[in-house]
Structures are given as structure tokens and as C-alpha cells.
Amino acid sequence: MTDEEIKKLIVEALESKSKTKSKFYLKDFYAMVPDKKPREVKNLVNKMVQEGTLEYWSSGSTTLIGLKGMGKQHQEED
Amino acid sequence: MPYDPSDPLKDRITDIGPRYYKEFVPPVIEKNYGKWLYHDILEPGVLVHVSETGDEVYTVRVGGCRLMSVEHIREICDIADKHCGGYVRFTTRNNIEFMVDGKDKLKPLVDDLKSRKFPAGSNKFPIGGTGAGVTNIVHTQGWAHCHTPAIDASGVVKAVMDGVYDDFGSMRLPAPVRISLACCLNMCGAVHCSDIAILGIHRKPPMIDSEWIDKLCELPLAIAACPTAAIKPAKTASGLKALEVNADRCMFCGNCYTMCAAMPLADDVGSGVAILVGGKLSNRMSKPKFSKVVIPFIPNEPPRWPTTVEAVKNILDVYAKDAKKYERLGDWAARIGWERFFEKTNLPFSHHLIDDYRFAYTTWRQSTQAKF
Amino acid sequence: MGKHKTPMLDELEKGPWPSFVSDIKQQAEKGKQVLKEAPDDLLGVLELSFEDRVTHWKHGGIVGVFGYGGGIIGRYCDQPQKFPGVAHFHTVRVNQPASKFYTTKFLRSMCDLWESHGSGLTNMHGSTGDLVLLGTTTDHLEPLFFDMTHEMNQDLGGSGSNLRTPACCLGRARCQFACYDTQEACYQMTMEYQDELHRPAFPYKFKFKFDGCPNGCVASIARSDMSVIGLWRDNIRIDQAAVKAYVGGELKPNAGAHASRDWGKFDINKEVINLCPTGCMAWDGSKLDINDKECVKCMHCLNTMPRALRIGVDTGAAVLFGAKAPILEGAQMSTLTVPFMKVEAPFEELKELIEKVWDWWMEEGKNRERLGELIQRKSWQEFLRVIEKDPDPRMVDEPRSNPYIFWKEEEVEGGWTRDINAYREKHPR
């Protein structure tokens, strides 16, 4: 798979779950792309944040990642 | 070019890290880097380090507040400019160190530091924190900034440091005593290896704001946040999606509240202080040790937490009288035995103090060795 | 008179220890912070917490500077109408210089920067080591970051599932015990792993700390997933004349650390020889003898007689893994993994080691599982295989007391496949 295909796959996976859950651990992304090394997936996910597709949500101690602008927290924090 | 809000990523600089430390060390440090031979504590809070080049650096250590204004930092800078060639250092334990390269420069610096007081009377720069004394308390944010604290941090620290002030400015104890404070059991300030740890704990499971929780939070995230899997989905009487907490499994960590503000945990009587003692980090004589819980709960008593202050002072005083020279608090307690510790400190021993968590068995006594 | 009445906090202006309340009040009165009301409103909300005995802060998670997953912690007040100056009050972690030396020029420009973009309040420093800027609004974050990087050549620290801002002890800058250059190691490792520090890479937080000797002033053994603690392998250097001077009372023992109390005359047998944990020292009245082969480098004799004893010259560090605070499984200290390693720039051996550990933890670690917990779950043996190190008795306090060894098939002669028919020839059914 090319990077672009993986990105598309990640977005689709996130969209399909977006009704109940908007944020995921990095580990959840590894599961979406099982044949890639965690480090490669991590780099790609971080790139998707740079590109504005995804965004981080940090509890201070842990980081979650989701589609940009999604989730109930947004209403409260904006 | 200044920041351009219409093009926030223009000329962006990232990943440059901290400034290189050698830009910030005074000339006497730069010149003698790696060449130090020995040090002496000339008086509490005042050290001299001697280099193999013959150079000396004199350090005056003063207590600082972790929560500090830029006005105060500027005053520190004024002092450092006046006496120390424009250099200053902070320690791991929120102390401030002023260094001069000659003994003649020491007295004017010390006099200057001692003369500075806040309008209401407290000292701005108390000198001490060295050797066999109490040094500054490392701590967390508390009610000044944190969302899951069980206690305040800065306020408790101020009250305790006032209480043990004489031991900050002297070296009468058998060994150094490190006091630390974490305002909840997540311990973003790791206090689990301190001679005396002041720890905030909650004792009531979170409340559920049931009518609102589904509007404010993503329920799966709150469920997943629980380290003991004590949270499960529920429905309100009116049929709204909500959550419920298995209270018996709750370990009062507040992780759910971090993810979901509709699950508040803190409580005016449920939350308070636990005291742990006997931890250490250094490998000196004995191996590093964890702190142990000796007082399971003291209520929050703002503004000055008198029961907590007295508890710390009591433990400190009994230790100071009873321990041998060089013996850390935990080594003393281990030598005399914990039954003696509770007797000498006059602290009650309750079932709360016996471990029933993951590694519990390792702390129970499998021996007939006991004192009466 | 401040904006809010703070009778309870005013009680904390009394007493000799520096009062943070007095300090915040002076910022409220004299400071030029852009969030003008912030110090006053912080006192107000804190006073309310003192009355209510609970916090009034809520957590937020989205805020940050673009492209960074760490460095900013979102914070909101639950009484924004009463305290508009701190309604949004985010924390900014700034990566401190190694061992926290500063020029006043740098500190003053940080003060000016923070007054133009925030509350004027700080933490000097946070527990992990960062210089913390306490309290600003979302719209100030990008300009603050821009000015900090452009004008001060200074970056943010870590938070979340990132590498956290590494920290080190004072080291060779002013300490005779530093067995390696803790500051250089801290700086170089921080620079090498900027990506991991700014962007989430792991199942949970990861901390490096660098202690120069087993005294452990930066507490690495208790709170860092990888603790690098200075050690030497050869002999303690002895100045016999200085030992005599301690015995004779010309030199103050323990560098004067017990000076405020009369502990009696220094007794080298009672205070040094007999307190040595391995009993590897002897004093015959004129000469100190150390059996260095048996020494475990506890530092007691060096701390007690710093002018007579010096660390050896074959210096480096031990590397330990797995420390963490009690959440979740219970507190753990780091376990001795590499008993000795040379730690010198460019620190390649250390980098190779850590990258093996990270690859394994990224692959195997559960969400929010610290390295120390993963090692416990998977076994020390598995960890050794991952980092390609041989087992060593120095890794344990004692060998296992249960015999339930999980033998591998390749360790057992002939493997596990056996011929039942051959067995039956000797043992009929």
C-alpha cells in the first residue's frame, strides 16, 4: 500500500467509528494497518496531523488522536 | 518578521530543542567544568566547591516557590546581575543558587539576600537547604492549576515549610530529609521515594452528571479511561445514555474526570492528605526505598493545614531525636522496626496501612521476629 | 487591595517561608502581563477552592501548537464568569537548559515574552524539569511559540504519550562525583529525539533522567523509564594525608553537612568503616585500605570524606529501566540492566539501546502501559532478548526461589518431540 492509500484507509476507519468515539490511541492505528511497522504508522499519523486531517487530544499524561474537529470536547473547548 | 496570524505556518521553526547549557554557565564553571575536587558546606545554605585549578566557586542556596511570578524572577535577575555576573541556577527541588567566584563577594550577596522580604513579612530568599537538614519541598499544582487534585499544593507546602523552617536553615538532623508533595495519587510529582511524602487522596468515587454526561462526553472514552474497569454503560430513568461506577472497584484516581468533566471526583470531606514516610533515592549505605503510608487520612484544613503540619513536625522531631548519625528516616524505621515507629511517633496503626493491592504479600511479615 | 477579597490566602502571607500569595499579589499590582486580570483572578479562584476545599479547574485536551502533540496542557476554570482572567488558563512547558543554569539575559527575555503572551506566572520548575509558563489563552499559543523559537531559539518540552523532557543532575558543572557528563548526555539525547519529544510516539509517557553518581540527585531511579546513573569500575582514589586530617579533626566530616549539632569527635571506624555496606574498608590507625573489588559504590565514604576520597578514573554509567510512580500496578524503581557502560559523546551505545527498547514497547505495550509494567508482564528474560543483553547476577537481588522455569525447547537436549513407541518398549501399557 502507498502512503496515500493508508491515509485513506485510516480516515475511513475513523469515520466508521465516529458516531460513538472520536479519539483513539496510537495503538488503535497500528491495528488499522497491521502489515506496517508501528514506527511507520506513527510517522504517518503524525504527518496526517501536520496536513490537518487529524488532531491530537492530550490528557496531559496520554495522547489520543482523532479526525480534526470531531468529538464532543470541541464544543466545550472552543 | 513578526508572527503573521493570517499565515501561521510561515517561517515556522520546530524541533530546535533547549538552548545549549554551556551558553548559560558562569565563566568559573565553564573554566573548571569536570575539574572539581571537593566541596564544603561553610554554613547552612552556603557551599564552596574547589577545583584542581585552584579556583573556587561559592554558592548560596535559597528557597524558592515553584509558583513564581515574572516580577520575582526579575528580582532574582537583579541580584544575579549585581553579584554573580548575570548568572543564576535553579535546582531540581525549586531552590535557587547564586554563585560567586571569590570569598570576598559572598558576604555582600548573603546580606542582600537576607534583606529582601515581601511586604507582608515573609522572606523572599531564605538561605539553607543543604546537608543534614530539610530542603525545599518539590510539589505539584494543586488547586492553583490542576483538575484532579485532592489537596492544594502551594498552600500546604507554604504551611509545612513555615513549620519546619528552622530545619531548612540548619543541619541538626541525622541525615538529609526530603519532603515531597503530590496533590493526587497519579503523582505527576513522583513522591514515592521521599523521606516524608504528603499525598492528596480522594475517598469518594466520582459522581455521574447523568442528565448531561452523554452531551458532554464520549462515553467509550470515559469507560476506557478507568484503570480498574469499574465504569460501565447505564441508562437514566428517562432513558438517556449514561454511565455507572462500580464503587467497590474505584481506586479514586480521577482518570475518568480527565476524559469527562461530567464525572467529578473531588469532595470537601472525601478528599484529603495521606502521609508516607521512609523512602529514599540515593544508594548511600542502603538501597533506594519506597515511602510507606503511615497516616491514611487527614482532612483538608485550609488555609494552613495544621494537622498535616503537626504530623510532619512530629515525625521529623521523633526521628531527629532517635536516629543515629547518617541514618535516613526509612533506615531508622527499618532498624527500630515499624511497631516501634508507630509507638514512638504515637501514630495509630489501622487496617488501611496494610497493603491489599498488587504486591501486598511482599510487605507482610513472614517471621516471628517482633517487638513487644 | 486586590480585585478579590482573599482572607484565607492572606493567612499564607504570614510566616518566614517565601509566600507565593505575596508574590502573585505583586504580579497583580506591578506586572505588565497581557492577561491583565490573570494573577488577581488566580488568587480569586484559589481562595474559592480554599473555601470549598475542592478544585475549580477542568481539563482540556485539544489545545497545542500546530503539529506538536506535547508541550501544552489545556486548562479551563469552572467559574469563568467570576474569574474571566483565568477562564482559559493553559500551561506551556518549555524545555529547560540542562541542569537549569541561566543567564539573566535569557530569563529576562523569557519574562518579557511571557508578559506579552500570558499571565506573568510561572513554575520554576515543573516536576519533570521544564520551565513552566502557567496560564494563557488559546489565541496566544501560536504567537508565543513563534516568538520563542524565533527570538529566543528555544523550544517546548514534552507531555502526553511523548518522550518527556529529559533532565539531569548538576554533573560536572559543579560536582566532583559526576562519573560522566550528564549535561552533555541530556542535551544530546534531547536533540536526537526531538521528534519523539514533540509528537506522540509511544503507548504512554517515557522519561530519561541522567544522574552523575549513585547519590541520585535527579531521582532517576525512582521516576524515569530509563535511568542512567554514573559509576566507576576501578579504584577509589585515596589521599591518605587527608584521611588522617579527618581522623585528627582538621577537616570537617561529610563536608560539614552535620554542623548544626554536636555529634562528638569524628570516629572513622564508627562513621565510615563500620557503615560500609560490604565491609570492604579497613583503618589501621594510619592507613585507610579499601578492597575495591568488593565495593558497590554506595558513595557513603566519599560523601563523608570528600577531600580524602575521589571516584575512580574508569568512569561511565549503569543503565536501569522501568521506574514509575504507583499508577497503575504499583510503584516501581528501575532495574539494573547494563551494570556498566561508557557514556561518551556521541552516545551511540545508549541510542542503540533505547531504540531497541522503544521498538519493542511500541509493538508490545498496551495503551497506557509504562515500560516497567510491560517488562513485568512479559518477563525480564524477554526484555533481555529484545535488548540483546546476557543475563547477569547483578540484575537481581537474588535468584528465583520457585523452580517454575519456562524452558525453551531448544534449551533441552533432543527437543520436546519424543517417541512414545520407544517408551512403550521399556514401559508396557
Image: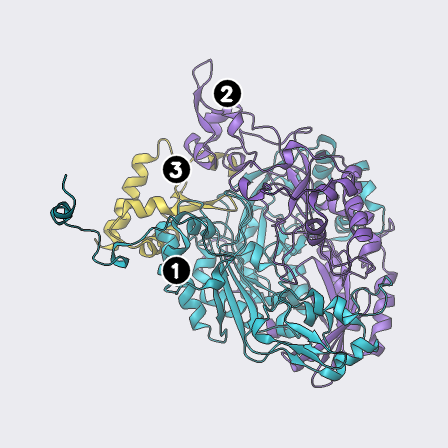
Chain colours: A yellow, B purple, C cyan
Q: What percent of the width, then of the height, locates residue C1?
A: 83, 42
Tell if the residue under mark 2 belongs to the same chain as the one under mark 1. Answer: no
Closest to the camera, between mark 2 and mark 1, is: 1
Q: What percent of the width, then of the height, locates residue B251?
A: 55, 34
Find the distance from the CA under tag 3 to the CA under tag 1.
38 Å
Question: Image quarter for residue C359?
Answer: bottom left
Amino acid identity at mark 3: Ser
Mark 2, residues whose alpha carbon is within 10 Å: few (<14), some, or many (≥20)? some
What is the chain letter for disc 1? C
Residue C359 in the figure: left or right of residue B167: left
Amino acid identity at mark 2: Glu
User: Which residue in the structure is indicated by mark 1?
Assistant: C384
Out of C333 and B2, give the one closest to the viewer: C333
Determine the residue positioned at 41% across, 65% down.
Answer: C353
Question: Image quarter for residue C280?
Answer: bottom right
User: Which residue in the structure is indicated by mark 2?
Assistant: B211
User: Which residue in the structure is indicated by mark 3?
Assistant: A22
Out of B322 and C150, give the one closest to the viewer: B322
Find the distance from the CA under tag 2 to the CA under tag 1.
51 Å
Amino acid identity at mark 1: Leu
Helix, strand, or loop for circle 1? helix
